[in-house]
């Protein structure tokens, strides 16, 4: 055969092998880029999910803080009331149950007037034997 023709065949085979190598390299590179893109999409979806969870927990924290403030105000109100309210309420309820008139001050005691007849006491009868 022709020596030049063999060189051309060899060069063509080398070129084909070189192109195959480049194609394999580009395919591996494309596969790696696709894998990285998929990972980035997953991380983006996870970040969106975490952002939604953060917003929900923040709104829940605000709601719980408001509830805490309301309960704290109620505790302060209950702590500032008189301590003997329970006895007063019980006595009012008992009075209602028994239909007793409401308690008032007792009227002043009226001193009896003494007459002169009251000062003489009969010590004995006039019919003494």
Image: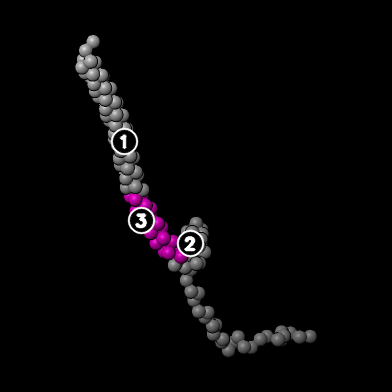
**Where is mark 2, residue-wise?**
89
Could you say where residue 17 lies in the image, as x and y percent from the top left?
A: 28, 22
Could you say where residue 95 lies in the image, as x and y percent from the top left?
A: 49, 61
Q: CA distance from mark 2 to mark 3?
A: 32 Å
Q: Is residue 11 above or below residue 78?
A: above
Q: Are marks 2 and 3 in contact (CB under 8 Å)?
A: no
Circle 1 sits in a helix, a strand or a loop, which is it?
helix
**Where is mark 1, residue-wise?**
36
Segment tinted magenta in the rendering: 58-79
Could you say where residue 9 lies in the image, as x and y percent from the top left?
A: 23, 16
Mark 2 or mark 1: which comes first in sequence?
A: 1
Residue sitting at x 60%, y 85%: 118
**Numbered badge on residue 66:** 3
Q: Are marks 2 and 1 in contact (CB under 8 Å)?
A: no
Image quadrant in which the N terminus is located: top left
Query: Which mark is in front, 3 or 1?
Result: 1
Q: Is residue 98 above or below residue 32?
A: below
Residue sitting at x 56%, y 87%: 115
Query: Which mark is in front, 2 or 1?
Result: 1
Circle 3 sits in a helix, a strand or a loop, which is it?
helix
């Amino acid at each position: 055969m022709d020596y030049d023709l063999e060189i051309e065949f060899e060069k063509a085979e080398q070129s084909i092998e070189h192109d195959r190598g480049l194609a394999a390299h580009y395919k591996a590179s494309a596969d790696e880029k696709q894998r990285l893109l998929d990972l980035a999409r997953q991380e983006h979806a996870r970040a969106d999910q975490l952002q939604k969870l953060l917003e929900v927990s923040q709104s829940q924290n605000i709601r719980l803080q408001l509830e805490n403030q309301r309960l704290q105000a109620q505790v302060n109100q209950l702590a500032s009331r008189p301590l003997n309210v329970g006895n007063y309420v019980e006595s009012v309820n008992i009075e209602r149950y028994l239909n007793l008139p409401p308690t008032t001050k007792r009227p002043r005691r009226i001193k009896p007037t003494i007459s002169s007849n009251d000062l003489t006491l009969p010590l004995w009868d006039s019919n003494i034997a």
